[in-house]
Amino acid sequence: MTDTTTLTAGPGTVAEWGARADVAQASLDHWYGTAPPQRWHNSHPAGDDSVFNYWWLAHVVDVRLDAWHRTGDPAWLAEADAVSENIRQRNGGELFNDYFDDMLWWALALLRLHRAGGEARHLEQSVALWEHVVEHGWNTTHGESLAWRKQSLHYKNTPANGPLIILSARLHQLTGDPRHLPYAQQALAWLEEHLVEPDGFVHDGVNREQDGRVDVDWRYTYNQGLYVGALLAVEQVTGDASLLERAGRTALTSLTALGDGEVFGDEGDGGDVGLFKGIAYRYYGLLLDRLAAVDGAEDVRERLAGFVRTSTDALWASSVVDGHLLPGTDWRRPAGGPMPYSALLSAIKATELRARLEEGRPADTRLA
């Protein structure tokens, strides 16, 4: 069994990374802030703000909750709630849109809000989103699983099924409602049958063009992180230790399949791509917590913790501009050209994880 204290990096590190996490959080408003209801420009320098990035905002809720967990400052919890309300306001007062993955990300953020603050409305909204997604997106095309969006019910992918598994397992764990767990288990079985390679690498989707083909060229950290998160969520309610082994295999495979073993590579300059790394860091962080209680997992945990350190060191060496963090999609070099705030969200997630790692502090169970 690995003692958490063996992962600390030395005197001064805790304060340094806590301060960097504060800077990272402040950088979102510094570089991208604008007047409500927009609140944040989509890119810096500011360009086209016509696109409403519903799922990016769900991850703003997540990072503000991370700051609340680290600092205990109730202002961060209030800010997370305000961002969640901003999503609904900008979405015409509605919870729902056409993308099942988008809705699931907000549902997960709402569940974290409920577990942090205890407000019933957040749980009610999360459940309402789950019910809507299952009613409109779950089907038998290419196997029982969740579609990506309402206009493409034939197309099944990891970005939709991964968060469905996580949300379904967590709702079951919290509420005991028997409706939820079967969807988590079926979607996980489908994902492993269609999109997970023997070495643990996770592909993006299948049947996009209604020809049954797997998109093997779409190789993203997003999918690895989601599969790890799905395995962890189901393991929490079933106690199946083999799920942790599979999660560790996928995480370690990704470090070299999608990076050089020390930092993830550039996954592209599209706006959504900026958030992909952050999803991997979020769930790899939860894996590190879980493995701390597992005998024989020392090597996996040390390699993952080492990667968090080398990659966040690279991030902060390349991406500080005028005292604030402004990362690109490759943390080994400075950002070039307009950058979406999705890329900064990934950097905030990674920095918050690094700060938590140096403190030896596991994720609060309210924020799992």
Image (cartoon, rainbow, N blue to C red):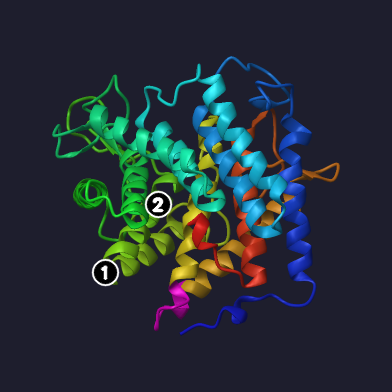
Q: Could one spot residue 347 in this view of the protein?
A: no
Q: Is residue 98 depicted above or below 272 in this figure? A: above
Q: From the viewer's perspective, is 250 left or right of 357?
A: left
Mark 2 neighbour density, 10 Å: few (under 14) some (14–19) many (20 or more): many
Q: From the viewer's perspective, is 44 left or right of 298?
A: right
* Residue sitting farthest toward the front: 120
Residue that mark 2 sits on: 224
Amino acid on which disc 1 is placed: Asp
Residue 64 at x, y percent in the picture: 64, 45
Per the rendering, the mark at residue 88 is none
Residues drawn in magenta:
291-300
Per the rendering, the mark at residue 240 is 1
Q: Nearer the viewer, residue 298 or 360?
A: 360
Residue drawn at x 63%, y 25% is 42
Q: Could one spot residue 242 in this view of the protein?
A: yes
Residue 293 at x, y percent in the picture: 44, 78
Residue 126 lies in the magenta-colored region: no
Q: Nearer the viewer, residue 69 or 203?
A: 69
Residue 270 at x, y percent in the picture: 53, 30
Residue drawn at x 78%, y 66% is 15
Disc 2 or disc 1, which is closer to the eye? 1
- Measured in 3D between alpha carbons, the distance from the residue under mark 2 to the one under mark 1, in whole angstroms, is 20 Å
Give the image quarter of residue 248.
bottom left
